[in-house]
Image (cartoon, grey):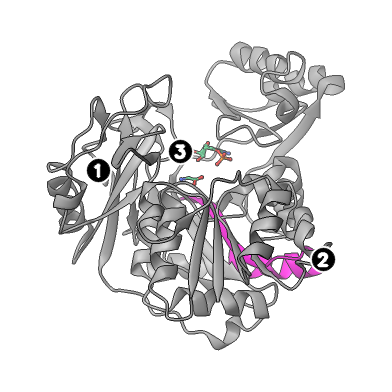
Amino acid sequence: MNILVLGSGGREHTFAWKIAQSPLCKNLYVAPGNSGTAAIATNVDIGVTDFDAIKELVLDKQIDMVVVGPEDPLVQGVHDYFLNDEAIKHVSVIGPQKIAAQLEGSKEFAKEFLFRHNIPTAAYESFTKDTVEKGCIFLETLNPPYVLKADGLAAGKGVVILNDLNEAKAELKSMLVDSKFGNASSKVVIEEFLDGIELSCFVLTDGENYKILPTAKDYKRIGEGDTGLNTGGMGAVSPVPFATDDFLNKIEERIVKPTVEGFKKDNLPYKGFVFIGLIKVGDDPKVIEYNVRMGDPETEVVLPRLKNDFVEILQAIANGTLNKIDLEIDKRAATTIMLVSGGYPEAYEKGKEITGIDAITESIPFHAGAQLKEGKVVTSGGRVISITSYGNTYQEAIKKSYQSIEKLHFDKMYYRKDIGFDL
Ligand code: AMP
Ligand code: GLY
């Protein structure tokens, strides 16, 4: 079959890498893709939310399946766009329909879903411009730190955690009244702070059945020791060493099962990946957030541990036959270290030549913000390339990634040297 992957990051390079290994895939396209996908698929320069151009490509190349990487097209309804068009409704789209994608597109929608289905999560209330004073009074009833979340998509920046009550009140006003995050903060969810260690659980569902992929933990802060600004993710480890069988069982029974049952009860059509952001409070898992896609860079450690034919799994998701699949997971650990442009997540330069990629033999370099230019691989984003390695232990895998990184170079390259430090 012919397959199109939407996106251009490390996650999409990993999808393409895994799909390209399948004998079921004839032609593979990535839109818009990067220098990594260019080497194993055909890149097509189309934006991920340009649905009309995507349709044209799908018809032109006789594409049978579209695998959606990022959340934006899902929240904007790419799956519904296909279903509502006679010419392309036969094409399988991997990703939930728009109404279900609100689980990521609206924090309030997600919180209501969690409470409706008795899934453990932080207590909350939500507020608008008209109820900002009530929001301030609610903040007074909470203990610090205060967690404020813009309701809509805010490019990963919409969550603000503050220790000072007055600062929290000022932040609430700035979000609601001064539209700090534009339309995304026209509503704000204020949450109880949960204290614990975070991990992510990835679930495949065809809307009826589910399969749980390996857990992973990512490192979001730019600085070592988890300090400094939030990023998209600076590295990841799979499996998560503290996720014991007993703890995984709690995640499945208390969170995964009621989530998939909730999709059915609420008529939320869902064929795709569910990324459940969790926090371990004491010995119990609680949901921090839902994402309706895979994580990045978690994908770069989760998919390399999956031994199955990935296209077979994607077909089972599309056809509602996920119950017939047995996941085979590599026992080894996988880790990834993200190399970023100096300055990221604030201003940084692009267009720096990356050298040494071909010298890497013991790890897999997944390209993110990297593009081909005049035959050279150059930086084109903040997160540039993610170096994944296997090991019998995560320590061994991390060591391999750091050794591989020694061979790579680009001007102002930065990476965290402490991935896994807290495990
Ligand atoms: P989110 O976008 O909802 O994942 O939030 C971003 C980050 O903020 C999470 O990864 C957590 O580190 C933190 N966070 C969100 N909600 C809470 C909470 N209720 N308690 C503690 N930390 C939180
Ligand atoms: N690494 C976190 C995310 O993909 O949202």
Query: In which quadrant is the N terminus drawn?
Result: bottom right
**Viewer-side label of 1, 2:** 2
In front: 393, or 307? Answer: 307
Tell me where residue 67 sits by quadrant: bottom right
Q: Which mark is residue 328?
A: none
Q: Position of residue 238 (x, y in %)?
A: 34, 59
Q: Mark 2 or mark 3, which has the lower sequence index? A: 3
Q: Position of residue 223 (x, y in %)?
A: 31, 28
Ligand 1 closer than 8 Å to label 1 CB: no
Ligand 2 closer than 8 Å to label 3 CB: yes
Query: Residue at 82% of width from left, 20% of height from top?
Result: 129
Q: Amino acid at mark 2?
A: Asn
Please say if 55 is above or below 309: above
Q: Which residue is mark 2?
A: 267
**Viewer-side label of 3, 1:** 3
Q: Which mark is residue 232?
A: 3
Tell me where residue 228 sits by quadrant: top left
Query: Residue at 81% of width from left, 68% of height from top?
Result: 265
Ligand 1 closer than 8 Å to label 2 CB: no
Q: Which mark is residue 421?
A: 1
The residues bearing labels 2 and 3 have C-alpha atoms spaced at a distance of 31 Å
Question: Would you say 326 lies left or right of 340 here?
Answer: right
Question: What span is in magenta?
Answer: 254-281
Q: Position of residue 337 (x, y in %)?
A: 28, 45
The residues bearing labels 3 and 1 have C-alpha atoms spaced at a distance of 19 Å
Q: Amino acid at mark 1?
A: Phe
Please say if 186 is above or below 338: above
Question: Would you say 259 lies left or right of 231 here?
Answer: right
